[in-house]
Image (spheres, rainbow, N blue to C red):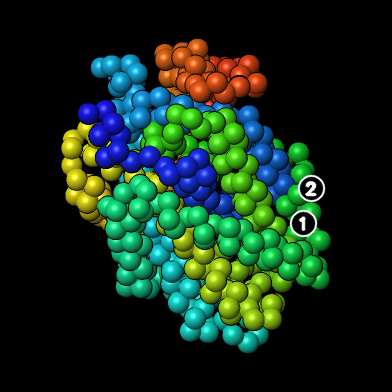
Amino acid sequence: MESQNLSQRGTWGSKAAFIFAATGSAIGLGNIWRFPMVVGENGGAVFVFVYILAVALIGFSVMLAELVIGRHAQKNPVGAIDSIKPRSPWKSIGYLGMITGIAILSYYAVLAGMLAGYFVKMISGAFRGNVTSQMTEQTFTDFSSNPFLVLFFFAVVLFITAYIISKGVKGGIERYTKVLMPILFVLIIFLAIRALTLPGAGEGIKFYLSPDFSKLNFKIVFFALGQAFFSLSLGMGTMITYGSYINKKDNLVSSAGWVSFSDTLIALLAGLIIFPTLFAIPGISPDSGPSLVFKVFPLIFSKLPGGQIFGMLFFLLLLVAAITSTISLLEVPVAYFVDERKWSRTKAAVLMGLCAALLGIPSALSWGGVKFLTKFEFWAKIDLIFGNIALAFGALLICLFVGWVWGVKKAIAEIKSGGKKFTIRHIWIFSIKYLSPIAILFILIKIIIG
Ligand code: PFF
């Protein structure tokens, strides 16, 4: 019975398959769209510095904690926590994660849809000839304020996501990530080299990498922490869910290390494309927010021979990276309904996809399509509440649960299962019991009370 249950849930084909899928979840718009946006809005290099600290000291520990819960219980977040601590309120971490997943998916898929639109634009040669920053600004405004186009591409992305999820973990997620992620990586390195060699790139590098610590404040720390959770897919049970499909023989510590490292590397490289380009080709301000990526990338392609081809390839791969993340957002509630309510994967994927679609409509229309939603910045409010605060709160609860309720001893036994070594366990214990929860709590309180 047990093995039948396991095979219905599916496990990853190999450790590499898990790593590709988890990295696929982590790497997405968070790295290439959101990271440059928050760096630009929060003072540049000083933000980058705090961000790296947040990933190393807190993000990595929380990721390991989530993977341990998942692999130990082999269940979705609600079921996993309930099996470790039966009938306790701690399983609300799982419910909170499901709601957060749907909420993030709702505006994330809108953005992913806009990338799909840019892919089509690239094919049709919208950015040929002498591309200027005014031109890329105008193109973005025209596109994002067209409600029909935005809603159409949004629907396409949600449909693809629900379709892949309905095919299951192995058939769906594993196959796509294996090949496409490495290609995206090579392309990003290539674009970074081009950006760094643009005349006038130096100012951008300075803004991005030379920190001015006098600018440091709580807002920066809060957004750096929120960005770390968002980018690493933490705080809502994604890594519990993905961890639940990991084989007992695999090494969780090196898996968490690899996913955190590669995710951070891609974000840092995205910044190395955006900021040098931005300063080398004047006209766009670093704090121009969510439209930054849409305005800057077409500029760099125009500086490359064969830029149209590179542009097409880039937007296509970014779309794939986004979809491997939307899949992981939808997988959290779907795994719950499949495991706990015995729904079929298809039914769960369709119904949860519809919830995200409904909530996403006002987000889609807040990019210029409908005036009052745009003024209210509807999507940005959802991003603040769910993409920052709810993820940080979820991560706080996960630390408390593993550090104090389940107990680090049992977690470490799971990490070491199969005779694995865990040399940095003292650092991890310190982080999960004290450093991470205290830091997150402090920052959340400070932000909420102002
Ligand atoms: N980590 C993804 C990104 O950086 O694009 C977004 C994301 C996926 C956040 C899954 C949270 C999550 F659970």
Residue 112 locus on image (x, y percent): 43, 61
Is the residue marked 1 within 8 Å of ligand 1, measured from its CB?
no
Image position of 202 with respect to 77: above or below: below
Q: Secondary structure at mark 1?
A: helix
Dot 2 corresponds to which residue?
Answer: 210
* Residue at image location 22% in from the left, 51% down from the top: 346
Residue 102 locus on image (x, y percent): 33, 46
Image position of 342 with respect to 406: above or below: below
Q: Nearer the viewer, residue 194 or 102?
A: 194
From the viewer's perspective, tell me whether residue 278 is left or right of residue 163: right
Binning the other alpha carbons within 10 Å of mark 1 as few (below 14), some (14 to 19) or many (20 upward) gives: many
Mark number for residue 104? none
Q: Quadrant of residue 216?
A: top right
Residue 142 locus on image (x, y percent): 45, 76
Image position of 43 with respect to 138: above or below: above
Q: Quadrant of residue 159?
A: bottom left
Report if residue 220 is visible in the image. Answer: no
Mark 2 or mark 1: whose residue is earlier in sequence: 1
Mark 2 is on which residue type? Ser
Mark number for residue 205? 1
Mark 1 is on which residue type? Ile
* Residue at image location 69% in from the left, 65% down from the top: 190
Q: Distance of mark 2 from mark 1, alpha carbons?
A: 8 Å
Report if residue 210 is visible in the image. Answer: yes
Q: Nearer the viewer, residue 228 or 287?
A: 228
Residue 240 locus on image (x, y percent): 41, 33
